[in-house]
Image (spheres, rainbow, N blue to C red):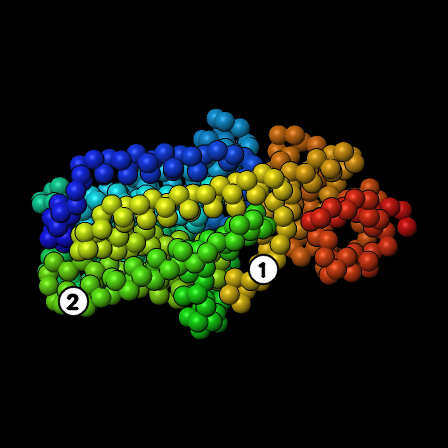
Amino acid sequence: MDDHRDSQSKLAHEHFIIPALLALSTALAFAFLFPYLGKVPGLNGDEAWLGLTVSDILTGHHPLCGLRFYTGPLHYYFLAPFLQGFGRTVGVLRVFTAITSVISVGVYFLVLRRLFGAMSAALAVLLLVSSPWFVMYGRTAWAFLALAPVLSLTSLYFFLHALDGRGRARWRWMVLAVVTLALGVWNHLLLLTLPAVLLVFTLFFLRERQTRVITALYALAGGALGIIPHLWCGSIDSGSEWASFLYTSSVGFFSRVMEWPWLFLRIIQGDVLFLRFTGEVVSPGSIVNVLFFILAISYAFVRAWREGARKTAVYQPLLIGFISVFFVTLSVSPGNSERYFLLPLYFVPLILSLFFLGIMRRLRWQRSLWIIVGILVAFNSMRIVRNYFMAYLASGGKSAQFYVGSMPETTYHVVRSQKLYSVLIDVGAKRIVTNFLIGMPLKFYDIEGKRFDAVDVRDGFPRGLVERLSPGTYAVTYPDQVHRDAVSAHPELELIFEEEDFLIYKAREF
């Protein structure tokens, strides 16, 4: 790839443009990732569960498995000092993700600079931090979103140093690369995508024997070390979770093959994410992002075709990496959730960057194309501000149902849990029965307030409720007709408060 890096010297004022791009990227990253962390978006049940688990760690519990067997506890222990030192609040719960997202931007630049040159890396970073998906994922307290980017990129950075090193230095870098890869796989099994793709490169693309051996060793060692804890956690329940995971992945495989390319474009466009995190799309987006990506990926295929079998090929390994990551992720993903697209999405800014810079070098439209890039960054930044921050701050989040492919989904926050918490305190609730997505945020808010005696979380509540609730117990459900009908089977429950996205019932003597 050396010829690609050298060719970038044709761009005018490169010594000024690269620092300017990096400075702007840093400013945007901090401006988008840290403000209103405790308010935007609403607290999700999984985030609240994470906060409760970390609180248990601070009181002496030491879990070795995650919420599911394919997730690890690494995020809990990284987050514990933050909650210990700064309090058990939503903002503190999320700040670790924001910090790791900023770090991942820096490592992203270092990795791309090594492979594609400083100009391509700097422009890719700017396109990354102005992407709607990066901002919304970078503010959410989910283990995969918090640690997968920084661990995978850091591992690749160490691995590239191992390839460049000699003697003991090479093996020191190799140990660091294997350890960080293993930590990433332990954090979430979906990161097995990385060693799987590296093995694809080893078998079908890499030519030098020594490079092939080192790459295979890195992939196998990191993947094997990382998967051992998952095998142990999965064995605790006699393998039933493994069986369920494999069944879910295999059954939905063909539907994902048909749906994921279109879903990938929808996530790049951004509206599905605005709907997920705020419940509405104030300013529906155009096809600008999708159009540029289609042009960029087409340009990459043309360049790859023209590269032939050159040792210095750039676009062939890039496309093989992108397609492999996309297909492997598709194959092992347990569903259509947008967060499972995270690793393939990191290729998008790079592909766009190479497209813009390639056109600049060939057509000498440097000034015009820099203006187009600036408009694209400003356009996406404006959409993030209006459709994400302003929309949520104005409404407090809206409950909405939509489809991600063939899978029905609801908004990320489900209900205005902070308002619900205040209402329950106002009505004097002490004992509450509800479902996971509503109950977990209530339990998290009450860690320090201690206003409730008990929050009983039941799967699918109120469906499946057989016994009568004791007098004085409060039940919280969604306002749709299905849940209203389920509650109607319990005459002891009296509706006392109705809101757009939740209902509160009180059990009376009957």
Q: Position of residue 364 (x, y in %)?
A: 18, 51
Left or right, 431 with respect to 492, comes to: left
Percent of width and height locating residue 393: 58, 38
Determine whether the residue tagged by mark 2 lies in a helix, strand or loop: helix
Q: Which residue does the image show at 45% across and 31% down from the upper left?
A: 81
Sequence-wise, which precedes: disc 2 or disc 1?
A: 2
Label number found at residue 306? 2
Q: In this rendering, would 21 be left or right of 453?
A: left
Residue 371, placed above or below residue 489: above
Q: Amino acid at mark 2?
A: Arg
Q: Determine whether label 2 and label 1 are within 8 Å by CB.
A: no
Outermost residue, right side:
510
Q: Tell me the residue at 9%/45% (across/down).
A: 166
For residue 270, above or below residue 423: below
Q: Which residue is at 62% across, 54% downward?
A: 400
Dot 1 lies on which element? strand
Question: Which residue is more in the foreground, 495 or 14?
Answer: 14
Q: Is residue 155 left or right of residue 390?
A: left
Q: Quadrant of the N terminus?
A: bottom left
Q: Residue 450's spot in the image, x, y percent?
A: 67, 31
Q: Residues within 10 Å of mark 2 (few under 14, many from 20)?
A: few
Question: Quadrant of residue 256 in the image?
Answer: bottom left
**In this view of the protein, which residue sits in the foreground, 448 or 330?**
330
Q: Is residue 418 left or right of residue 62?
A: right
| The one of 204 and 406 positioned closer to us in this rendering | 406
Residue 10 image position (x, y, % from top left): 13, 47
For the residue marked with disc 1, what is the amino acid?
Phe
Q: Which residue is mark 1?
A: 402
Quarter of the figure with residue 125:
top left
414 is higher (above) or lower (below) than 106: below
